[in-house]
Amino acid sequence: MRKYVPKGNVQKQSYYTDRFHVVPSTPRTKVETDDVFATHLKTLEAKITVKSSRIELNCMVVEINHEDNFKALEVLKEECGYAMLSEMSAVDYLAKDKNFEVFYQMLNLKEVKRMRLVMRIEQGLALESVVPLYNSANFAEREMFDMFGIVSNNHPFMKRILMPDDWEGNPLLKTYPLHGDEFASWYEVDKIFGKDARDVIGPESRDEGKIERYDSKRFSRVGYEVPFGTEVTPGEEVKTEIEYSKTFLVDYTKGESKTIEERK
Amino acid sequence: MQQPNKLSPFFENLNFERDDNTMVINFGPQHPSAHGQLRLILELDGEQVVKAHPDIGYLHRGIEKMAENMTYNEFLPTTDRLDYIASTSNNYAYALAVEKLLAVEVPRRAQVIRTMLLELNRIISHLFFIATHALDVGAMSVFLYAFREREFAMDLMEDYCGARLTHSAVRIGGVPLDIPSDWLANMEKFCANLEHELEHTYNALLQENRIWKMRLENVGVLSAEDALSWGCTGPMLRGSGIAYDIRKEEPYELYGELDFDIPVSDLNDSYGRYRLYMAEMTQSVRIIRQLMPMYADTKPQLMAHAPQYISAPKEEIMTQNYALMQHFVLVTQGMRPPKGEVYVPTESPKGELGFYIKSEGDPYAYRLKCRAPSFFHTGVLQQLLVGVYIADVVTIIGTTNIVFGEVDR
């Protein structure tokens, strides 16, 4: 039987997991332990529903419903003094919980406090854009759309930002392989030479670590060097008698080495 | 009338040719002043910019995707390729984020070395800024002088870690090496030389230079509200009159113990920002001067003691069986940090460089987001460039000090 490979997450997985390994958690405290955060949370709770809250590693994390994102950021900006949206993006939980986690990382410069607003959103649903509040969301929301496919409504220019406009697939999804999918391997061939050239050129090798033993144009096998471009048939390689290759391929069993003698 | 085909696609200025309208031009991605791979699509009315659209992604390598497929230690050298002008700042920001997640304590000597390297990298980056900015504006000789000093700084980096550009000089939990024997003496020489050069070469060449002031003053004016709204940090924020430096406000490493000033400018323009960069270099020299005597009274330990996450020192690995076993597990499988999420900001030469790491307890990060200052500084070009003349476009790109390794990631 073929080994089961989870399709929802094709990222690299640990090949060995200790059955008895208990994963610890980062220390989390209640928001009430910090006065400033507690007042901010109270202001926020008065306006919108807060699902959960905690302080994790000096940062308040507040979970809300994704419909309230604009209102929550408005309250945080106008009433709690979070003047800067440092960063926003998403985390893919499609395989586990069938949704994304979107986070907004905020900074209050006056009180020197950082908080993170998190919300879960199902695939296919759109968020409200927060560009009217923070211009920094302009690029950040485009990047989120590019990488995860989460659309922001009423964004001034909702287009891909890092990948080409005609790209298919969202690279940061857990279902997207590291070296790209089928579409990615044909993208440049189609773009530069046209689809007709597919048979002649073949798919692009997107694994930069790949070594082809019989490709004499890009690789050279030590001890079996051939002139550039020679076609090598597997199984019929000819050993080359080149001096320098001997320095690499020292046969310690044959030579007269003192150390080996001693070890014997 | 154009007849574009596959070999000659040409469609840009139809509008302009038809009814004497605005003209659309492409600036980059191969323009020498585009600081790497910036493509700006500018809509021009005469010589004035009506609309600017920064098109990025030409250097996109998927570093965040790679982070999800690499163990924590494997990923560290990749962070060199973010802001490749000051690689140690990236290494450090990443290492600090992981250390916060692991809750490990870094030994004192490693802290001294790290802070010194960070400030040295700040000087390297700022010298690069002065050099390229002056070159963009048209002052060729400043470029040559600044690169000479930058070369001395890079020699110091080379003496420490062997690399000049992609340093990887910081490890998760400390630093890999102690400083060489004559390094501090060389550093003192470098500092004295830099102070002298700052005063007598750069300031003398630029500060009151009539052409330099004409090209920079009132160009790229960014108000404090806009700077906050666009997520500007570092010199872009302080150049708009907001005194916020993460080293001072949320001190990390040894910055809490050090005595230094945060230069702020309320000129809001490119000239103010240039003055900030110069002042910050003087402050960096001041910080390094304070750090040098601190090194002497530290214990020789360089890496944190946390056997669950960080390999023991080489001597222990070579002599003790259990340390070797733990080292083997950490190298082959990677460390497994606690479950949780962390966002750690640091003050890189360009601004707030932060790493958001989401860990599910596996050796691979579940999600890593790099908050790069240049990414947001590229976004602000959409506003800064509107209404300026095309000659000032290059000045404004220069003053934002964007590096494309960081923008595209």
Image (cartoon, coloured by chain):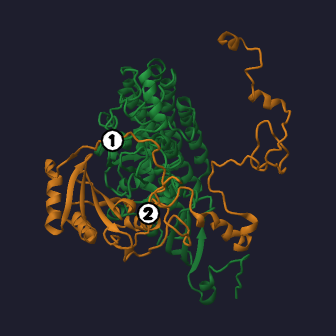
Q: Residue B18: x, y in percent?
A: 62, 89
| Relative to A85, A146 lies left or right | right
- For the residue carrying disc 1, how many other residues have a C-alpha within 10 Å: few (<14), some (14-19), or many (20+)? some
**Element type at marker 2?**
loop
Q: Residue B246: x, y in percent?
A: 33, 46
Question: Image point 59% across, 42% down: which residue?
Answer: B147
| Residue of label 1 | B100
Q: Which chain is green?
A: B
Where is residue B36, by image quadrant? Answer: bottom right
Q: Is residue B257 visible?
A: yes
Q: Residue A78: x, y in percent?
A: 22, 66
Where is residue B94, by image quadrant? Answer: top left
Residue at mark 2 to residue at mark 1: CA–CA distance: 42 Å
| Residue of label 2 | B218
Q: Identify which amino acid the numbered label 1 is placed on.
A: Lys
Identify whether B174 is placed above or below B361. Answer: above
**Element type at marker 1?**
helix
User: Which color has been applied to chain A in this rendered view?
Assistant: orange
Q: Chain of mark 1?
A: B
